[in-house]
DNA sequence: AGTGGGACCTGTCCGC
DNA sequence: TGCGGACAGGTCCCAC
């Protein structure tokens, strides 16, 4: 379930349990997802504390007190869920929930939370397009995953000015340009469609036509920058979009899919 | 530089 | 009820 708003929703759902937790054990149930796990993946995490959980583009980043960062990408079908042993909770209550086939639980983080409770965070990914890695914090920015990533659309960098700079001279379509993670990082099919619709722009229009001859942003470019930000913020506020019964880490559903103006509305 | 195709995987849905 | 095909929120790689 993974464009930027969904990943941010996952981050917010996991943070109260994951941040500050001691990782007592990691079950790694297969050698690879999209890529092989790094050597000694489980061993390098066990006994360490996860100090902070952040996000860059569609990546979740867990700071580990070893100086490494746990890099996680959800691919197309990755999701997390939390299980804990608090009174009143049936262990594994989400395991048999719809769409939660336990055979696709590829990683289990066993935790002692900052509050002293025991909990587990499980990573489930039927299609296995997601992946996890461990990268030293110092090398993160130059790592191939992040080296070429474009600007963060919710940061302060996205504006009509920056869109004009990124789009100048490009004959590729707006749709392709906005999906290009080297320009803006975090948009996918749904939110590109929605942001273009809100701006009244055709996805087929060449990106370079949003730039004047002097390299200034057109009015549409300024509006598009604002609409990208607003669409993402609206979606995060709604808890992301829930398609095909994908649930959030707490088992609840995001509801932004009800606000789609264009995605999955062909012919309407 | 851009684009079209195929690849990686499994689950679900639709039409017959 | 069963089967085949199309399709899915992501990305990479290659040929042109």
Image (cartoon, coloured by chain):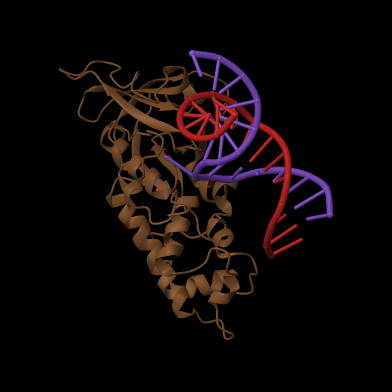
Chain colours: A brown, B red, C purple
Q: How many marks?
A: 0
Measuring from the top left, give residue A66's x and y in whole percent: 43, 34
Q: Is residue A219 above or below residue A241?
A: below
* Identity of the residue drawn at 37% across and 53% down: A260
- Point out the image quarter for the N terminus of chain A: top left
Q: Is residue A160 above or below residue A126?
A: below
Q: In which quarter of the view is residue A174 placed?
A: bottom right
Quadrant, the C terminus of chain A: bottom left
Residue A11 at what x, y percent from top left? 34, 41
* Residue A18 rendering spot, x and y as whole percentages: 31, 33
Q: Residue at x 26, y 28 (%)?
A: A113
Residue A91 visible = yes
Q: Position of residue A155 (x, y in %)?
A: 39, 61
Does residue B14 appear to the left or right of A112 in the view shown?
A: right
In the foreground, A194 or A148? A194
| Residue A156 in view | no
Quadrant for residue A80, please give it: top left
Q: Is residue C8 above or below residue A227?
A: above
Residue A150 is left or right of residue A200, and the answer is: right
Name the residue at 42% across, 20% down: A101
Check the image and report above or below for A173 versus A20: below
């Amino acid at each position: 379930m993974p464009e930027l708003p969904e990943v941010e929703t996952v981050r917010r759902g996991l943070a109260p349990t994951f941040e500050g937790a001691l990782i007592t054990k990691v079950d790694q149930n297969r050698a690879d997802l999209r890529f092989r796990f790094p050597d000694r993946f489980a061993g390098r995490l066990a006994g360490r504390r996860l100090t902070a959980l952040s996000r860059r583009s569609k990546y979740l980043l867990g700071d580990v007190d070893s100086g490494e960062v746990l890099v996680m990408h959800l691919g197309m079908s990755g999701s997390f869920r939390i299980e804990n042993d608090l009174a009143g909770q049936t262990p594994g209550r989400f395991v048999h929930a719809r769409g939660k086939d336990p055979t696709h639980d590829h990683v289990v983080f066993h935790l002692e939370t900052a509050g002293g409770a025991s909990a587990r965070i499980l990573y489930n990914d039927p299609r296995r397009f997601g992946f996890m890695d461990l990268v030293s914090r110092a090398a993160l920015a130059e790592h191939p995953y992040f080296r070429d990533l474009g600007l963060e659309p919710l940061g302060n960098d996205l504006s009509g000015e920056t869109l004009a700079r990124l789009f100048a001279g490009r004959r590729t379509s707006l749709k392709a340009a906005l999906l290009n993670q080297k320009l803006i990082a975090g948009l996918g099919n749904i939110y590109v469609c929605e942001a273009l619709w809100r701006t009244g722009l055709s996805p087929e229009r060449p990106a370079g036509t949003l730039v004047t001859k002097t390299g200034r942003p057109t009015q549409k470019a300024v509006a598009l920058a604002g609409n990208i930000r607003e669409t993402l913020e609206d979606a995060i506020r709604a808890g992301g979009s829930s398609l095909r019964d994908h649930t959030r880490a707490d088992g609840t559903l995001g509801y932004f899919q009800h606000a789609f103006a264009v995605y999955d509305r062909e012919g309407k």
